[in-house]
Amino acid sequence: MFDRILDPTGLSAGTATVATSAGRVPTLVGTRVGLLSNTKKNAAQMLTEIGRLLESRYGAVVTIQRTKPNVAWPVDEPMLNEIKAVSDVVVAGVGDCGSCSASAAADGIAFERAGLPTAVICSDAFEVTARAMAEVHGDKDFEFLLTPHPVAVLTEAQVAQRAEDLAAVVAGRLCEAAR
């Protein structure tokens, strides 16, 4: 017989916090973009390329690019605040494994709650994992941007092509006018 059931998420029982989506920016022209990578191979390169495309095509300005110290943990409050201080929107990822997809979901929800529209990129093989974590964080309908799995094994040219394929979708997630 069981005395109790342990929750592996570390969250207490009770009502989940309801996520608040940040309002989309009206335009990307002059919009300050923060990029948050998660240490997965090719993640920083993909985000850098997406940032470059947001600048060249939409007039956005990348103001900060950071890499989380641990792929499996959500962004900590000091790093979130550092990015928030110099950004109007955030692009985060790449969720290309179970733990990093889950933490990417948590990152996106944290930035949205902080008032920053956020585009979270995950590979399609881990959508279920990311969705489960989003639900744990109170937003089962959080909108992820999916890219084919895997990302970590791509060549530099393939990473650039994936960024090209995602740029308009990222813009649409961040900006109402780009939808």
Image: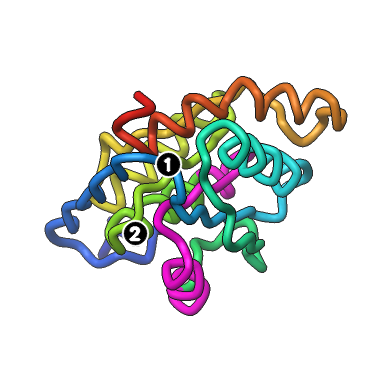
Above or below, 70 against 102 in this view is: below
User: In terms of depth relative to the viewer, which is nearer, 90 or 93?
Assistant: 90
Q: Which mark is residue 28?
A: 1
User: In terms of depth relative to the viewer, which is nearer, 27 or 133?
Assistant: 27
Residue occupying the far bottom of the picture: 78
Q: Which residue is drawn at 36% across and 40% down?
A: 27
**Identity, as a three-letter code, of the amino acid under mark 1:** Leu
Q: Where residue 42 appears, x then y in whole percent?
A: 76, 41
Q: Residue at x 56, y 29 (%)?
A: 167
Q: Where residue 177 appears, x then y in whole percent?
A: 32, 29
Q: In this view, does 37 lie to the left or right of 79?
A: right
The magenta segment is 77-101
Q: Does the magenta stretch include residue 88?
A: yes
**Identity, as a three-letter code, of the amino acid under mark 2:** Asp
Q: In this view, does 29 lie to the left or right of 45?
A: left
User: In terms of depth relative to the viewer, which is nearer, 94 or 24?
Assistant: 24
Question: Counting other residues with Cα less than 10 Å from the Cα at mark 1, is it few (<14), some (14-19), or many (20 or more)?
Answer: many
Q: Quadrant of residue 165?
A: top right
Q: Residue at x 53, y 57 (%)?
A: 34
The residue that disc 2 covers is: 7
Q: Where residue 65 appears, x then y in whole percent?
A: 63, 60
Disc 2 element = loop
User: In terms of depth relative to the viewer, which is nearer, 109 or 59?
Assistant: 59
